Image (spheres, rainbow, N blue to C red):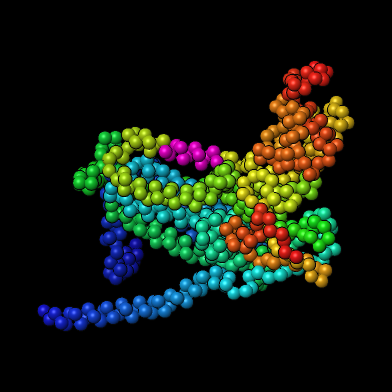
């Protein structure tokens, strides 16, 4: 029969073993969790969003809305075509623009511009928007997402880099219904 | 023969598993469970094995890179010998698997099999259902085409509505700020490692529970489940009136599994593989994204819910549904098993089936979506042009040019977003038509800024002609009294 103090020593060793493995587990766990959270952590550093050129002003006739596209700033070689992001550019007059995200404010499907009726229509759930991006009808609760823009050396630049979604902070900043004028 | 027995004996001396395997195969089951109603679980397992095999075969050639995935699917479809067939087997296998898992679940529910002592079997089954649906969605993403790309966009948009954490969840889901290479890679990891691994583990647990607790007996009306007596009753049922699972009950399982495999192969040969549709190039916006069959009902829900209800329904609805399913064996763990004495259970199944069926049917032709090319692709029926004045015909041109046809059908063709206009003149007077066109309202955009006064006049003149010849258009009686001219 084992004396009681012998038993407690063995129990102690087992407990120490568990503690040791727990400590190693935490040591390994922290970098693993950080690795998994990298898409979120990276957001705090600059780089997700930057000023991107959509081309020369001459490409965008006054009073018309044209499809433009840009290469996403954080693209890498495996992204292929998916890093080419389209957007709708409306040249209101002179250097006054509106640049709309392609994504419907409802659930992100690509909206199409119909110049004849002056409407953006979404093929998924039937959202429609007027030419200034404000909601016309359908399930969206707000207007189209709008990118901040500036004109520099005859080029149209927009501040972009993230897929606009309803809950994103950037989406709130550029909410049309808030009446914020696009930056110039 | 003697050699085989000798080799077998050599292995069994070391593995010592022949006896437990024989005991498992020959374990007694209630006589009536050797029934066609009990074949769906084994069929789901068979299709799962088919999915594992065809999945590994596809992984031999599939390239999980956003730039290359679509091309590798084209190569599988068109260049690799019988690559199209393996893709078709995997695609149809997934449809069959979702369907069989759902049928299995309905059968288990109607037969009261979730009651004591099989609560945990049911809960593991719910997890298996979720994992199966997870495989279906992630599999659709790996078919990296336009539907997959915009489907991910919809998934991200839904996730972004989660309060506070939404934007983070979006980035974790996409693996970055946009749908791109990292997104496909993580869905590949989910579809190929994480979810199948969990499925194998939970299928094992599910089977272990079925073996430990025994297959559910055929429910007899009036035979009540009580925690105190059930185990004893079940033991008597299996040992006094039972049959060994092999060969007593396994034959129907085998025939049904073989039949299902044959059906999948037949569908694969006849219908071929699913897609891929257009390239996953977001700059190609001439696309009408649609989810795969088993998520069409959700697509319909998202279109038909009032906008203010959407976010709560999307975020709270699944939690409630899951909670009810998980809690079911705990608040109804005893009592009647037979569906003949459980009318509410039968009604629930019928209600859910009718609801899902109706929503899926609606999503098939999506009356809420504008038909994006109706204005250029659907002609006006000839009878609406015959004998019309120049002004009315000018109105027809306005109708087409301003995309009215995308949302309004004429002669059955065109969009269903707005009402059909074949009889619109019966419902609205001229003034009401003008107001509706210019100001919009009800779900219609206002066209005031995009129609000149002559265009509006022409359009309304055309709309005024849209009524059956034997019925006069709607009139404004007060106006008529003043003018006194119209018949």
Residue placed furthest toward the right? B390
The one nearer the camera, A73 or B85, is A73
User: Measuring 63% from the left and 65% from the top, which residue is drawn there?
Assistant: A162
User: Measuring 68% from the left and 66% from the top, which residue is drawn there?
Assistant: A160
Residue B198 visible in the picture: yes
Instruction: Classify the position of the C terminus of chain B by image quarter.
Output: top right
Going by the image, does B185 lie left or right of A1? right
Kindly indicate the quadrant of the structure image that contains residue B71: bottom right
When the figure is inspected, residue A144 is found, relative to residue B346, above or below; the finding is below
User: Measuring 58% from the left and 70% from the top, which residue is drawn there?
Assistant: A43
Going by the image, does B222 lie left or right of A94? left
User: Measuring 35% from the left and 41% from the top, which residue is drawn there?
Assistant: B111
Query: Disc count in the image?
Result: 0
Name the spot of residue A90 as percent of width and height, x first.
Answer: 77, 57
When the figure is inspected, residue B15 is found, relative to residue B41, above or below; the finding is below
When the figure is inspected, residue B169 is found, relative to residue B118, above or below; the finding is below
> Magenta span has B302?
no
Magenta region: which residues?
Answer: B348-359
Name the spot of residue B22 as percent of width and height, x first.
Answer: 29, 57
């Amino acid at each position: 029969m084992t004396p009681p103090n012998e038993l407690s020593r063995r129990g102690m060793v087992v407990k120490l073993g568990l503690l040791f493995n727990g400590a190693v587990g935490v040591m390994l766990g922290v970098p693993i969790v950080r690795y998994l959270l990298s898409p979120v952590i990276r957001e705090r550093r600059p780089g997700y969003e930057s000023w991107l050129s959509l081309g020369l002003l001459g490409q965008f006739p006054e009073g018309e809305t044209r499809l433009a596209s840009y290469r996403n700033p954080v693209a890498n070689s495996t992204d292929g075509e998916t890093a080419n992001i389209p957007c709708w550019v409306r040249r209101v007059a002179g250097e006054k623009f509106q640049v709309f995200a392609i994504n419907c404010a409802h659930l992100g499907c690509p909206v199409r511009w119909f110049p004849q009726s002056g409407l953006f229509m979404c093929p998924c759930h039937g959202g429609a928007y007027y030419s200034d991006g404000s909601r016309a009808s359908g399930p969206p609760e707000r207007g189209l997402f709008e990118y901040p823009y500036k004109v520099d050396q005859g080029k149209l630049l927009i501040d972009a880099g993230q897929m606009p979604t309803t809950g994103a902070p950037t989406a709130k900043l550029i909410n049309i219904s808030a009446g914020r004028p696009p930056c110039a | 023969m003697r050699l085989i027995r000798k080799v077998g004996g050599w292995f069994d001396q070391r593995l010592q598993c022949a006896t437990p395997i024989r005991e498992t195969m020959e374990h007694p089951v209630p006589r009536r469970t050797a029934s066609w109603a009990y074949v769906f679980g084994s069929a789901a397992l068979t299709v799962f094995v088919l999915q594992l095999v065809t999945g590994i075969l596809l992984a031999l050639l599939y390239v999980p890179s956003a730039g290359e995935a679509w091309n590798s699917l084209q190569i599988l479809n068109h260049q690799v010998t019988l690559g199209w067939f393996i893709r078709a087997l995997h695609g149809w296998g997934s449809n069959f698997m979702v369907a069989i898992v759902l049928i299995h679940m309905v059968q288990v529910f109607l037969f009261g099999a979730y009651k004591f002592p099989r609560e945990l079997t049911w809960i593991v089954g719910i997890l298996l259902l979720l994992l199966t649906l997870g495989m279906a969605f992630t599999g659709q993403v790996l078919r990296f085409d336009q539907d997959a790309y915009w489907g991910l966009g919809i998934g991200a948009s839904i996730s972004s509505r989660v309060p506070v954490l939404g934007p983070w969840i979006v980035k974790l889901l996409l693996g970055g700020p946009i749908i791109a290479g990292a997104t496909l890679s993580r869905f590949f990891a989910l579809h190929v490692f994480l979810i199948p691994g969990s499925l194998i583990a939970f299928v094992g647990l599910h089977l272990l529970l079925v073996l430990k607790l025994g297959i559910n007996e055929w429910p007899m009306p009036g035979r009540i489940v009580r925690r105190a007596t059930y185990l004893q009753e079940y033991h008597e049922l299996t040992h006094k009136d039972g049959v060994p699972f092999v060969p007593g009950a396994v034959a129907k399982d085998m025939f049904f599994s073989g039949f299902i495999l044959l059906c999948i192969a037949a569908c694969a040969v006849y219908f071929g593989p699913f897609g891929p549709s257009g390239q996953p190039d977001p700059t190609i916006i001439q696309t009408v994204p649609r989810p795969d069959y088993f998520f069409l009902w959700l697509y319909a829900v998202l279109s038909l819910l009032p906008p203010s209800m959407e976010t709560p329904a999307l975020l709270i609805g699944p939690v409630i549904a899951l909670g009810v399913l998980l809690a079911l064996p705990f608040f109804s763990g005893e009592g009647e098993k037979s569906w003949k004495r459980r009318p509410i259970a039968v009604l629930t199944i019928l209600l859910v089936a009718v609801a899902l069926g109706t929503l899926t049917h609606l999503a098939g032709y999506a009356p809420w979506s504008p038909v994006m090319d109706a204005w250029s692709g659907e002609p006006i029926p000839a009878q609406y042009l015959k004998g019309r004045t120049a002004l009315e015909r000018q109105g027809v041109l306005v109708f087409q040019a301003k995309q009215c046809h995308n949302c309004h059908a004429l002669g059955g063709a065109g969009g269903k977003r707005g009402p059909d206009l074949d009889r619109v003149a019966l419902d609205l007077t001229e003034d009401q038509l003008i107001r509706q066109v210019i100001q919009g309202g009800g779900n219609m955009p206002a066209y005031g800024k995009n129609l000149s006064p002559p265009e509006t006049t022409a359009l309304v003149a055309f709309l005024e002609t849209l009524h059956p010849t034997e019925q006069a258009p709607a009139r404004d009686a007060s106006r008529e009294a003043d003018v006194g001219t119209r018949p």
